[in-house]
């Protein structure tokens, strides 16, 4: 297996404001972060079902040649899906001050997120980027609402 790490930084002033107020209570916020990480993971898995990037754009379609290859091998023509590992091995990660979605260290995970070139091994690996990791505006609004609920409960 290939080890790699992709960090997607969420830069949202509204979300940062709610997080700052939540952390002002000075308590370990692991429960809230676990809730965010778990929900974010499911929202990321939903992108595989809708075949859309976090920004809402549709993933680039499969080439006709690759569609035929998948069909002959008995795989569905669904994008980023053969055996389901890329989608199904996503995991939530969290701590007292962070929430994240981690992907399994699959050798093709970064290739699908960022795309590849014809010179990449095993070649040719010239595939378009089909981003699945990240946070959509809807994800950010959901995170803000979820964290605001924790803040209300803490404030009593």
Image (tube, rainbow, N blue to C red):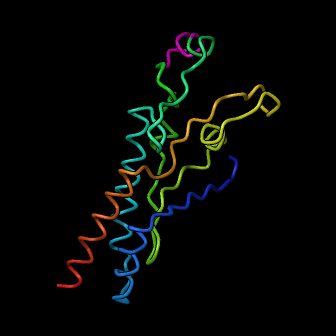
Which percent across, then down, holds residue 80?
Answer: 52, 31
* Residue 50 against residue 138 in the figure, above or below: above
Q: Is residue 104 magenta?
A: no
- Left or right for 83, reference 40: right
- In this view, the residue farthest toward the bottom is 26
Which percent across, then down, holds residue 12?
Answer: 45, 64
Residue nearest the viewer, comparing 122 with 117 = 117
- Left or right for 74, reference 28: right
Total count of labels = 0
Which percent across, then down, holds residue 133?
Answer: 51, 48
Q: Quadrant of residue 66?
A: top right
The residues colored magenta run: 68-75
Q: Is residue 72 magenta?
A: yes
Which percent across, then down, holds residue 146?
Answer: 28, 65
Q: Residue at x 65, y 41 (%)?
A: 114
Q: Residue at x 36, y 49 (%)?
A: 42
What is the magenta segment's predominant secondary structure? helix
Q: Quadrant of the C terminus?
A: bottom left
* Residue 57 against residue 141 in the figure, above or below: above
């Amino acid at each position: 297996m290939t080890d790699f790490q992709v960090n997607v930084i969420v830069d949202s002033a509204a979300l940062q404001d709610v997080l700052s107020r939540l952390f002002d209570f000075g308590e370990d916020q692991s429960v809230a972060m676990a809730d965010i990480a778990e929900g974010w993971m499911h929202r990321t898995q939903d992108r595989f079902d809708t075949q859309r990037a976090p920004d809402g754009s549709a993933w680039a379609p499969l080439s006709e040649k690759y569609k035929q290859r998948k069909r002959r091998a008995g795989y569905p023509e669904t994008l980023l899906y053969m055996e389901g590992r890329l989608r199904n091995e996503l995991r939530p990660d969290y701590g007292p001050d962070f929430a994240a979605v981690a992907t399994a260290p699959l050798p093709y995970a970064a290739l699908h997120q960022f795309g590849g070139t014809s010179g990449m091994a095993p070649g040719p690996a010239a595939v378009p980027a089909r981003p699945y990791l990240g946070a959509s505006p809807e994800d950010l609004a959901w995170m803000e609402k979820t964290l605001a609920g924790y803040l209300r409960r803490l404030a009593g």
